[in-house]
Image (cartoon, rainbow, N blue to C red):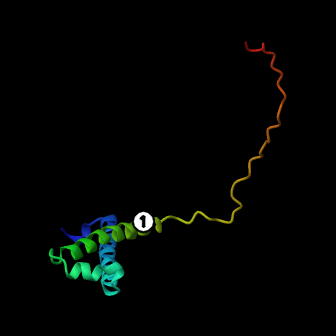
């Protein structure tokens, strides 16, 4: 697939995924490096090998990529804050209580 014909949104998504998974590498390295909650011991002494480490990296990568993409999309919005005075405040009418007389028969 020619990258010159790739839509801009797809390019942005791929870039966001790459940044998210790179951040995940740093995050998992810090988790293992600082031995948060004994995680280094659990991962390095696991009988499953490197699989727990790959799973931590992958699932954090999905989260970080999603957040990165959401941030990139939301930062594209136009700034609607202009100092032209904006709209006018609608008057607020406060309701005043009105006494209501009810004629009812007593209950049995």
Q: Is residue 55 above or below residue 28?
A: above
Residue 59: image x %, image y %? 28, 68
Residue 73 figure quarter: bottom left
Residue 34 figure quarter: bottom left
Foreground pick, 18 / 61: 61
Residue sitting at x 27%, y 73%? 56
Foreground pick, 11 / 54: 54
Left or right for 65, reference 82: left
Foreground pick, 24 / 79: 24
Q: Is residue 58 above or below residue 102?
A: below
Foreground pick, 84 / 88: 88
- Secondary element under disc 1, as helix, strand or loop, is helix
Residue 60: image x %, image y %? 32, 71
Q: Quadrant of the C terminus?
A: top right
Residue 2 figure quarter: bottom left
Q: Quadrant of the N terminus?
A: bottom left
Residue sitting at x 32%, y 77%? 24
Residue 94: image x %, image y %? 80, 42
Q: How many marks?
A: 1
Residue pushed farthest bottom?
A: 33
Residue sitting at x 69%, y 54%? 87
Left or right for 32, reference 80: left
- Pointer 1: residues within 10 angstroms few (<14), some, or many (20+)? few
Q: Is residue 74 above or below residue 40?
A: above
Residue 15: image x %, image y %? 32, 73
- The residue to which callout 1 is attached is 73
Residue pushed farthest front?
A: 108
Residue sitting at x 82%, y 34%? 97
């Amino acid at each position: 697939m020619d990258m010159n014909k790739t839509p801009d949104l797809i390019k942005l998504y791929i870039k966001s995924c790459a940044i998210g998974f790179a951040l995940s590498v740093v995050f998992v390295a810090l988790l293992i490096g600082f031995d948060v909650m004994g995680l280094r011991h659990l991962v390095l002494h696991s009988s499953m090998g490197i699989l727990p480490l790959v799973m931590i990296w992958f699932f954090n990568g999905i989260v970080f990529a999603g957040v990165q993409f959401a941030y990139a999309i939301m930062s594209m919005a136009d700034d609607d804050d202009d100092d032209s005075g904006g709209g006018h405040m609608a008057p607020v009418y406060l309701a005043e209580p009105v006494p209501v007389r009810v004629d009812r028969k007593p209950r049995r």
